[in-house]
Amino acid sequence: MGDNEQVAKLVAGDQEIDLPIMGGSVGPQVIDVSKLYGNTGFFTYDPGFTSTASCESKITYIDGDEGVLLYRGYPIEELAVKSDFPEVSYLLLNGELPNKAEYEQFVHDVTYHTMLHEQMINFYGGFRRDAHPMAIMCGVVGALSAFYHDSTDINDPHQRMVASFRLVAKMPTIAAMAYKYSAGQPFIYPDNSLSYAENFLNMTFSVPAEKYKASPTLSKAMDRIFILHADHEQNASTSTVRLASSSGANPFACIAAGIACLWGPAHGGANEAVLKMLEEVGSVDKIPEFIAKAKDKNDPFRLMGFGHRVYKNYDPRARVMQQTCHEVLGELGITDDPLLDLAMELERIALEDEYFVEKKLYPNVDFYSGIILRAMGFPTSMFTVLFALARTVGWVAQWNEMIEDPMQKIGRPRQLYTGATKRSYVDLDARG
């Protein structure tokens, strides 16, 4: 180590060793423990890896205490209001915002990859009609590698680029078809004259007998939901994509793994859980009863959509979603939906109640996105699908970064073993 390098001193038993301290461009410093086992025979113990930096990344930064989320250095609030999803996708994938020519070329490349191989339609027919759309997404995305052999070589930069375009472009088509299949409606093919968000809404809600025209307000709301969910640092699904990628798996398999992880209610299913919670509360007059249950430490009931594991302050994405939520409800003129009335009253109470304010249990992005998606006509089973659609570009950016990182190696977490020690086999007849 150089004279100016910072070190952390670790005393383990009768050993004392120096561990390098590494600093990033912003955020907490990290202690490099990569050689700890080799030097001491000790592993670190960190369930959930909540205090462990698993990689070096230049893509997304979160400061949960201050309520900050940056994509490549740009605040999420600015991007959500001033940008659109294709531009944000370019930023995540390439590191910089595009100029006009780069933007137009990127939109063109994504637009002309939106079609699915026609034989893939047969996959949908193999699922039960009542299959959860996320189950369909896992299967169909994983199957992409069976149809696009020319973009599975992860060592070829050109093939990685083509795979990246295909995943970002085809995910709306796959998601819309999952919805159409569950609704018993015919599939609607992509329309290259529409924007990314408009095209998805058209494939989802249009039918051959009646064309669907999304209003600018709804299209912008959909676009913002995509932007706000595009990436979120090393969360469970992103870490899953990276772990799968570390083995050399093809990109479609890695993204399918991410979708499977996202499906969990503690991760991507949170906005679906918000609606289920609202249904459990049932009516505005029961809110005080459930507020009391939420405050009771001995009651297992939880108010879903309030507070966040990472953000100890206001979720920066929720600020944008709150505004968008009220724009959408105003546009649609919804005045007779008890669940939405309930949600709005719950929001009002949470922002004023001393208990919620003191503990910073503010409405988060899942609270507002669930309300918006319900108002737009999406069934709750589609909420996590939309999350997966938006997060795909973040997963792809993280996947590309990992492959290009010379320090990357196959993931191999360690464990604290607490099982039986070595023992001898006893023949079956001799066992009591």
Image (spheres, grey):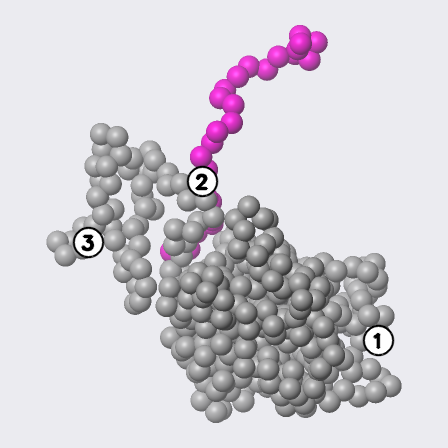
Residue at disc 3, secondary structure: loop
Residue type pointed to by label 2:
Arg
Decide which of 372, 339 is in the foreground and name it.
339
In the rendered view, would you say 432 is above or below 63? above
Residue at disc 2, secondary structure: loop
Looking at the image, can residue 250 be seen? no
Q: How many other residues sit within 10 Å of disc 2, few (<14), some (14-19) or many (≥20)?
A: few
In the rendered view, would you say 268 is above or below 347? above
Provide the major secondary structure of the magenta segment.
loop
Direction from residue 277 to residue 230 in the image, left or right: left
- Residue occupied by mark 2: 414
Decide which of 84, 337 is in the foreground and name it.
337
Q: Earlier in the sequence, mark 2 or mark 1?
A: 1
Q: Earlier in the sequence, mark 3 or mark 2?
A: 3
Residue under the point 51% across and 53% down: 243
The picture places residue 129, in percent across and down from the top left corner, at 84, 62
Q: Are marks 1 and 3 in contact (CB under 8 Å)?
A: no
Q: Quadrant of the C terminus?
A: top right
Residue type pointed to by label 1:
Pro
- Residue occupied by mark 1: 186
Residues rendered magenta in the picture: 407-432
Q: Tell me the CA gap for discs 1 and 3.
A: 62 Å
